[in-house]
Amino acid sequence: MSDEATPKTPRLFGGLSLSFIPPAAGDGPAPATSASPANGAGDSVEARVAIVGSGPAGLTAAIYSARANLQPIVIGGVAGGGQLMITSEVENYPGFPDGVGGPELMGLFRKQAERFGARIVDAEVDRVDLSGRPFRLWAAGVEYRAQAVIVATGAEALWLGIESETRLRGRGVSACATCDGFFFRDKEIAVVGGGDSALEEALFLTRFASKVHLIHRRDAFRGSKIMQARAAAHPKVQLHLNRTVEEVLGEEHVEGVRLGRTDVPGEETLPIDGLFVAIGHRPNVAIFREWLESDEKGYLATEGVTTASSIEGVFIAGDVDDHRYRQAVTAAGEGCRAAIDVERWLEAQEANERTETAEAAAPTVR
Ligand code: NAP
């Protein structure tokens, strides 16, 4: 499917350009668990490295750590593959000049990880205990024990939560201007939100769109003053304050929005071809919240330039710690960094253990 051929049905999810096709049976990686190391409740599986999450970050970490002979086990979620699994055409992942389907791309990631021996389990981690090594994780009633853990659980865009928005996602409703703006050349579009993301996306989209309507529910923006000033001064940006999106209009693709007023009674209709929802993102941190430190925005925190978390032996990669870039390719890069950090950390641990063992075995010299 070509994005060029379907400019009115762009779909972006988590940093990818696409024209949306719901994931079809047979797309992408085999749904079956590729590792069957455990048979049910009460079983326990040992691994040197456990990777939680199977999006670009998790599977890149799996490729690198498998090639480093760390025999990783990826506990990748029930569906597996992350946000790309509901993405059809990805046009901005390097190496695919003609674009590639999201599920197909994740299928390739997975195949590459498995080729080097990564075990991939299609189950959701529902509980962890990071109080000591081995770290313990539970998924589908099975306990996994690992010397090191890479957290690559991603993040998800926040949505308005109205039925028409869900129905038209990928048909003109998007949560990523970087990914989908390209599809709206010379179109009239709207951005909803009042923070820096909305202001930034509105300004970015002026490169493509003929006009950008910026819709915010209050009379004042939350975003920075400089971004507000830029948006207000831009000839292509029209502000719509004190408005809420009540309904996205259109059957097959976005044709407009029905706006409610928050200052005075009344409604209005705005004809547009695309709606960008920029009301924030939420990192998938729930099972790790009590263990790992987060930054002020709720994303998992890393130490310095490394992927190390606040717990030694636990590393973080991808959108779960990245509120700035949120691209598949940056997530993959972080997965690589996390795997290299794990490899070096495990090597250091094992070298220390060997030294301690040797010292303990050596005769005492008086
Ligand atoms: P944010 O600052 O939390 O802003 C979210 C905006 O969406 C708010 O204006 C909020 O309205 C609105 N909103 C939330 N739920 C809504 C709903 N259901 N319906 C309508 N509107 C809704 O999120 P963000 O803009 O993604 O920014 C997140 C953080 O990243 C911020 O700290 C921001 O400064 C930073 N950031 C920085 C840059 C940059 O420096 N270039 C770029 C992007 C983001 P209210 O204002 O009424 O609450």
Image: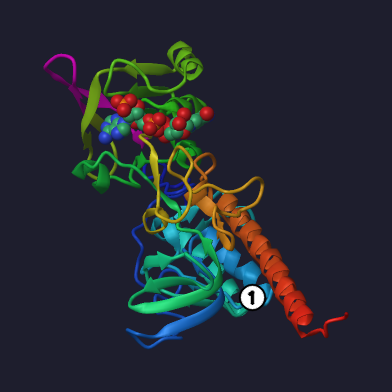
Q: Residue furthest bottom?
A: 39
Percent x, y of residue 60 = 59, 63
Residue, disc 1: 70
Label 1 element class: loop
Vertical side of 323 occupied by 123: above or below:
below
- Indicate the quadrant containing the N terminus: top left, top right, bottom left or bottom right: bottom left
Which residues, given as a range, are shown in magenta? 258-277
Q: Residue at x 64, y 70 (%)?
A: 65
Task: Report which quarter residue 192 is drawn in.
Answer: top left
* Front-lying residue, 9 or 69: 69
Mark 1 crowd level (few <14, some 14–19, many ≥20, 10 Å Cα): many
Percent x, y of residue 17 = 48, 47
Percent x, y of residue 268 = 18, 21
Q: Residue furthest front?
A: 366
Task: Report which quarter residue 161 is drawn in.
Answer: top left
Vertical side of 361 occupied by 208: above or below:
above
Q: Ligand 1, what quadrant?
A: top left
What amino acid is labelled 1 in the image? Leu
**Can residue 248 be seen in this snapshot?**
yes
Vertical side of 305 occupied by 313: above or below:
below
